[in-house]
Amino acid sequence: MVEIAEIAVSAAELKLGTEPVQGAGVRLSHAGPRSRYSLRARDAKVLAEVVGRTLPGKIGDQAEGVICLGPDEWYAILAEDTVLPRGEGLPVSVTDVSSRALGLVLEGPAALAVLSSGCPLDLANMGVGRATRTVFETVEIVVWREAEDRWHVEVWRSFATWLWNAFLAAMPGAHG
Amino acid sequence: MILIHCPYCEEARPEVEFAYGGEAHIARPVDPSTYSDEQWEEFLYIRNNPRGRHHERWRHTHGCGRFFNAVRDTVTDVFETTYKAGEARK
């Protein structure tokens, strides 16, 4: 009788790690608690006045944690417990989405290769400080290149366990 | 993988970030209540199916989230051009 190795992994076996994992040239960890806001407005000037921050004007640009995702859409990743004014009565939408996503951080010289294992963007040519919404395999993520070798990845909570394990699978020397 | 130029992001982005949105430049009825069954059928279901140059809507779903229009060759799958929604047919 032929022995067949078990390769299928059930969802119940997937665990979201809590401690950082060190691989060869890359470290995976949690970004920690953040305050997150989804900002929408047709008129960026009105929105900038309401939240009292600079809104980057070009899609893919980022300024102090505020990322321009689309022509009328910004995503703010701010320090924990930051509260933004809502601008009631004005044609803007300032929505607290802190609990919607969590941030994973890949850092080290091999981080680019780990991220590129499932992300089809040309990440090597992405400028430091730039950020964009994209996909990892089929999971939607927001990638922010915080430094040359440091990538902040925002993912919706329900996909986080899978993404954590997908990163682990792509990390050299991190298989437990 | 095909790269599609998003007119809003002003970048060539991987095809998997996009979703197809059907034929472009289908005008909605200005006064729907006056439409006959035949006119509704025409508006809802009748589409061109050209061999070659096709005007179609695409959405940069996993990017800026915008709908835009594209001219794609249905034989070669080559994108001739993309332009913002609301701009004249190219």
Image (cartoon, coloured by chain):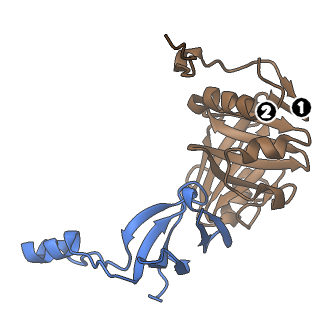
The chain coloured brown in the image: A
Asked if the residue at tag 1 contacts the one at tag 2, i.e. Cβ–Cβ closer than 8 Å, the answer is yes
Residue at 87% over, 41% down: A110
In the rendered image, the vertical position of residue A37 relative to residue A176, given as above or below: below
Q: CA distance from mark 2 to mark 1?
A: 7 Å
Q: Chain of mark 2?
A: A
Measured as percent of width and height from the top left, residue A72 is found at 61, 62
Q: Chain in blue?
A: B
Q: Which mark is residue B20?
A: none
> Which kind of residue does numbered mark 2 sit on?
Met
Tell me which corner region of the image, top left, top right, bottom left or bottom right, holds residue A29.
top right
**Residue identified by numbered label 2:** A171
Residue at 78% over, 55% down: A123
Q: Position of residue A47 (x, y in %)?
A: 67, 58
Q: Say which mark, if any, is on residue A24.
A: 1
- The front one of B47 and A42 is B47
The answer to whether residue A120 of the structure is visible from this angle is yes
Q: Residue at x 37, y 80 (%)?
A: B25
Residue lying farthest to the front in this orientation: A1
Q: Residue at x 56, y 20 (%)?
A: A9
